[in-house]
Amino acid sequence: MPERPVILIADDDEDVQRLLTLYVRPLDCEVLTARDGEAALAIAQSRLPDLVLLDVMMPKRSGWEVCQALKAVQRTSHIAVVLVTGRGDVKDRLTGLQLGADDYLVKPFNRDEVVKRIAALLQRKHRDTYSAGELAKASESMLFDKASGLPTMPMVLAQLKEMLIEQGEIGIVYVDIEQFESIEAEYGWAFFDEFLRCAGEAVAAEARNRFPKAIVAANLVGGSSFYIFFESRGTDLRQETAFDHMASDVREKLIAAMRERFPNMQQGQIGFFVGAARIDYRPQIRLERQVYQGMQSAGDTVRNAEQQRKKELTRELRDIIRRKKVTTLFQPIVWAQKSAVFGYEVLTRGLPNSSFRNSDVLFGFAREAKLAWALETVALEAALKRLRSFELDGKKFLLNLEAEMFEESEFRIHEMVSFFSEHRGNFVFELTERAAIEDYAVFRRLLDEFREKGIEVAIDDAGSGYASLEAIAALAPDYLKITKGLVSTLADEPIKQDLVKMLVDLAGKIGAKTLAEGIETVEEYEWCRDLGIDLLQGYYLAHPQDEPSIGDEEVEASLKADAARRLLSAAR
């Protein structure tokens, strides 16, 4: 007979404790109680309940602090945490999500909703409960990188220590994927997971070809780097220069293998940083420390190459700005509930053969190199030239702009603003808030100057730390662009679903439309539609294109096919 589940109710209000205890009685649980955060943490650590209901505002320790403490330690990380509060705005829920909370209840409670949510979490925990043998297998699976299928360092450390003692030395090759952020940003996370898997296979194949007894490991779960450990004694790698030559050869072989697997990627997009080092066994030093010191030495050679690469990229970016070598593309934005294109986000990239083929990478690196304003100027000039070359046809065009740019007098008299004024209702400034806005009242007046010219305003990254609720409330944007961090895995995470619902409700209250970006799967597409989001954007719908009208028919045909498929599925 299964044991009764244990629930801890932590709230400094005795009436709330009694009420929640009464609500959970139908679940046949053992109920523990605590009146402050310290007591709640102590009870949770000693009794290991199945679920904790945590009041956010408690004496001694807040519910947020207790949640963070429980989720940060392996022994208590499995405990389901439900935050209970009278504060139900987006910011509070984001805080809970970031701290690892499993769900959120807002006072005043609805009995049926409380029972339903707690029962669902207990059922999920029951499904995830393992026997001792199964738990060992599950723990072992966590030590394998799911993307590449390779073991991580903790899994191979014992083998490496044995190899070091037996052989007296170990060779190490460290492999890091070059521009991995650029690949994921341009092609999406699903493609990049496949790229990682193939990269792991290529590294393992190269290791087997060179070193019969090689041990290959992923550096971290979900990371972009790998280690090859091999018996170096008796090889011709005693000289440091030999290691350098070997690392260079491994790099070329890996690039060739990945180009063969991904022939449609541009040549410069596939690259690896490779470094090599050797560990000489020293009995007086702890074995683990010798292994990790060797790993650091191999990594240092790569970091030097990365620093050199950064200098090269800075020179390339300066050349892009000086010669105005950028490409303007248009990514379709579609109505969620209609089979039609709403408008386009105007994207700026480097030329196809440059290192900056992705907009996020281009502008992110420009901010790091203190060249953002110069790049923005070139990007706006190029966009204006393209926009003048075709009919706008009543579509909306969204342009990304840093918040700091709005205060620049040079920008406010820019010829682009005059062009936008001539085409009232066609343009939206997508405000990216990477730095704090010091005075919202002053900034709102600046935005009103543009609104008077018929230019609308969107706030980018709604639902992230960048786009604060304060900014949304003070600036009253026309569009809330929901960050891809909330869209990704939306189907599997109830808190994300609640956050998106709240943003949709918030947008309705201020008269704004919602736009979800980064949609890459049919599940993300359907969840965003079901949650009431107005507009959708992402690779699942359409990739950026050269002309705003090219491909619209294909996009709309695909949307109609999706709608027909859903109707057929519902009929069945």
Image (tube, helix red, strand yellow):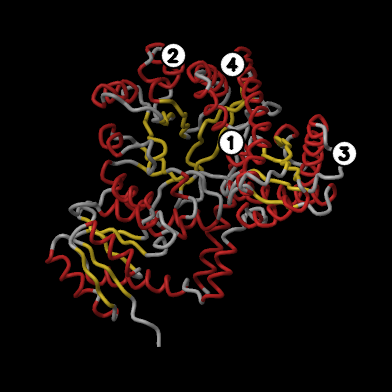
Q: Quadrant of the N terminus?
A: bottom left
Q: Which corner quadrant of the image does residue 119 belong to?
A: bottom left
Q: Which residue is mark 4?
A: 321
**Disc 1 marks which residue?**
549
Q: Secondary structure at mark 4?
A: helix
Name the mark on residue 414: 2
Identify the element where label 1 is drawn: loop
User: Relative to residue 508, is residue 560 depicted above or below?
Assistant: below
Characterize the local packing of mark 4: few (<14), some (14-19) or many (20 or more) Cα atoms within 10 angstroms.
some
Mark 2 vs mark 3: in front: 3
Marks 1,4: beta carbons within 8 A: no
Q: Which residue is mark 3?
A: 236
Q: Residue 262 sits in which quadrant?
A: top right
Q: Does the CB distance between marks 4 and 2 fall below 8 Å?
A: no
Q: Locate residue 133 relative to residue 424 in the image: left or right.
A: right
Identify which residue is drawn at 69% across, 46% down. Answer: 227
Amino acid type at mark 2: His
Q: Secondary structure at mark 3?
A: loop
Amino acid carrying label 1: it is Ser
